[in-house]
Image: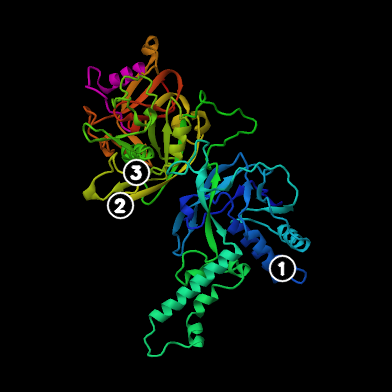
Amino acid sequence: MLALVFTFPAGRYHATPWGRHVNEADVAWPPEPWRILRALVATWYRKADRDAFSGDALAALIDRLAERPPDYALPESVVHAHSRHYMPQAAAGDTKLVFDAFARFPAGEPIVAVWPDLTLEDEALALLRHLAERIGYLGRAESWAECRVETEDKRWTINCRPSSSDDQDGDDGDRKDGAETVRIIAPLSPAGYAQERTRLLAAAEAQVLASWTKPKPPTGKALAKLIAPTAAILPERLFDALALDTGDFQRQGWSRPPASGDVLYRRVPLSPLPRHRTGRPNRTETNLPTVARFLLAGRPRPRVEDTVKIGELMRLATLARFGWDTDPATGRRRPRAPAVFLGKNADGRPLADDPAHAHAFWLPQDADGDGFIDHVVVYANGGFDAKARAALDQVTRLWIREPDRGRRSEEETDEAPDIRQEWRLALEGFGTPKDFENDVPFLRESRTWISATPFLASGHLKAGGRCAEARRLLIRRGIVPADQAHRLEVTEEKTIRINGRDRLPLHFHRFRASRGEAQLDTAGTFLRITLPEAKRGPLALGYACHFGLGLFMPAEPKPDD
């Protein structure tokens, strides 16, 4: 048995999977065998005592480690986290938003790569220990790492190992145990690389001969010269192939290293929500998170005035995670999504009779007050179960169609072409309104609330106008007890301020894309509401309140309140 034990003093592992863009905010999890062996090679070149340990010794060690991909013991309390930075570009003053995704876990929990059937000779083991103790990082340079070699079984819990086709269940490769199958880049075995090298050199020779136009075929020397650029990136030893720079094979028109291949691994999916919380009770199905918060990025970012558009797009993107069924009677497609997202019962009817509005609210947020939406908060009073959380975790982008194609419909998937405007999403985490109140003001407690978006009546306006309609909804929803209605105050406001500008209701988009719901109020107004007692948000009332209209923010009471 042989194991490399990596610990990360900062509790962070930064690495982007092969073939993925950094702004996809994905993490190479587990650390790929390709990355680990390349770290050993780089350490030998930069830090090793090459008088004591020759290149031939390293080549023999790499051959042994590449024979079989390792198993992994990964931290159980890992979290998929990220930060974001505006990186300077070539032009003065120009910046670009970059996501820096990483795996976060307690600094004391190691990542262990285990070769259960591998035993090294004394010289090779001494070289491996020499290299391991000199590794300073794994992944990107900010992934500070310490490494040691173990040859005795420490009873690590192996929770990630190479997968066979028998391990998979269904087209998506997911099993009932919650694990998923991922492709990990790994070095070919020495025999596999020798075979691949022979194939690629033969292909290069065949290409030269196919394009040869002279009467006589090229001599062996001439042929060797013509295929020399290809041969230069196909060294005989696997060790030398691992040392190649990415630009070497990309100049040859290859998209990946010639000495690499994909290995399927079974792993527990990375999630923004810890599977086990240190010092805190595990969340049960009776104590579900009710809030999910997303970061939204893209240029240009949507305006606050387009809140309802982004709210609807967010719902449609989530519904797409579940797919659709076709009604045999009508031929129409119906979403398979649960009621918490769909807002409809099993018969397809809206949950209009639910005064608690337990299904999801899709609430865009301008967190920095610049007048543009930069976050989306999804709130459901009934909570998000494991299936709902998994779906939200997979929502990574929103978009709007080309003008001649109209807006996205519920029947379209996220693979459809002709996208005009796209925004990226990154899930920041799950929790309760109290967990997010420092970053999301409309999730705080307050007695006085003021409109952040226009309030539109959900029915015919009656005596008392929109103020009376808001009073009716507050009582019907149970926010204000009927016996306390005399203490409820609702008044109209002419304007609200957004980034230093006065805005009227007519400045906002006040219509839903779907025309299935009757809209009797198209003008709307702004309101100030003073409740009998302080209540925790979100507070959203009226037409399209589940998509960001009729949203209220905590406000300071007026002096005479």
Tag in front: 3 or 1: 1
Where does residue 78 sit, x and y in percent of width and height? Answer: 59, 41
x, y percent for residue 66: 62, 60
Image x and y of residue 151, in percent = 75, 51
Which of 335/136 is in front? 335
Q: Is residue 255 magenta?
A: no
Give the residue type that dot 1 points to.
Ala
Q: CA distance from mark 2 to mark 1?
A: 52 Å
Magenta span:
453-476
Which quadrant holds the C terminus? top left
**Residue wearing tag 1:** 57
Nearer to us of marks 2 and 1 is: 1
Q: Could you tell me the amino acid type at mark 3?
A: Arg
- Taking 240 as reference, is 330 above or below it? above
Residue at 54 percent across and 26 percent down: it is 284
Q: Residue furthest top?
A: 483
Residue positioned most to the front: 166
Work out how far the residue at label 2 is from the one at label 3, CA to CA, in angstroms. Answer: 24 Å
